[in-house]
Image (cartoon, rainbow, N blue to C red):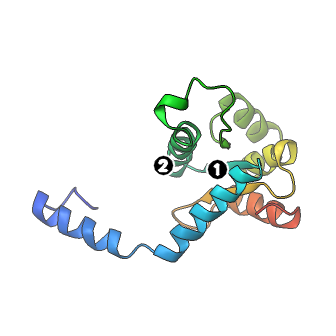
Amino acid sequence: MLGAQLDSSAYISRLQQELASVDQAAMQTWADLTYSAWQQERFVYVFGNGGSATTATHISEDLGKSSLREEDLADESKRRLKIMSLTDNVGWILALGNDVGYESIFVQQLMNYGRTGDLVVAISGSGNSENVLRAVDWANRHGLV
């Protein structure tokens, strides 16, 4: 595990290697899609499980607030990025998990909120989370980006 078995120098070296491996074109595409959603006043929905859920929350908070300069935060006329983490409504997630099934906790929320042209950001470390995959499949079939 990064940091658990490495001293600080080795950790920083490994971190630099990991950052260098980030696909810059994919990052630019994500930024462009997010900017386009803001321009078109579309919603952005972010979700994932476990640590990815907290990442979804953090991304939503940062992008929701940081789409404005500090001095513009009080200005009601400034357009904001419409972004929401689908991991943050614990009561709804637990009700869906209990009544419908954990595999449907994100897709059910997208059924309520999602509209053609909205942006979906699905986060999964393994790439195999059924609830994430089902939501992405639904989003693709219903014209979400």
Q: Is residue 50 above or below residue 77?
A: below
**Residue in the image at 87% along x and 57% along y:** 116
Q: Quadrant of the N terminus?
A: bottom left
Task: Say if residue 7 shows up in the picture.
Answer: no
Q: Is residue 108 left or right of residue 3?
A: right
x, y percent for residue 31: 57, 61
Mark 1, residues whose alpha carbon is within 10 Å: few (<14), some, or many (≥20)? many
The residue lying toward the viewer, choosing from 110 and 83, is 83
**Residue in the image at 86% along x and 51% along y:** 115
Return the disc, 2 or 1, that comes first in the chain's sequence: 1
**Residue in the image at 76% along x and 61% along y:** 134
**Residue in the image at 74% along x and 62% along y:** 136
Q: Is residue 132 left or right of residue 107?
A: left
* Front position among marks 2 and 1: 1
Residue furthest top in the image: 74
Amino acid beneath label 1: Val
Query: Marks 2 and 1, Cα distance to the nearest angstrom?
Result: 13 Å
Q: Quadrant of the C terminus?
A: bottom right
Q: Secondary structure at mark 1?
A: strand
Q: Is residue 29 above or below residue 96?
A: below
x, y percent for residue 133: 71, 63
Q: Identify the mark at residue 58; answer none if there is no mark.
A: none
Q: Secondary structure at mark 2?
A: helix
Task: Say if residue 35 shows up in the picture.
Answer: yes
The residue lying toward the viewer, choosing from 16 and 99, is 16
Are discs 2 and 1 less than 8 Å apart at CB? no
x, y percent for residue 67: 56, 43
Amino acid beneath label 2: Gly
Q: Which residue is mark 1?
A: 46
Q: Quadrant of residue 57?
A: top right
Q: Which residue is mark 2?
A: 51
x, y percent for residue 119: 72, 56
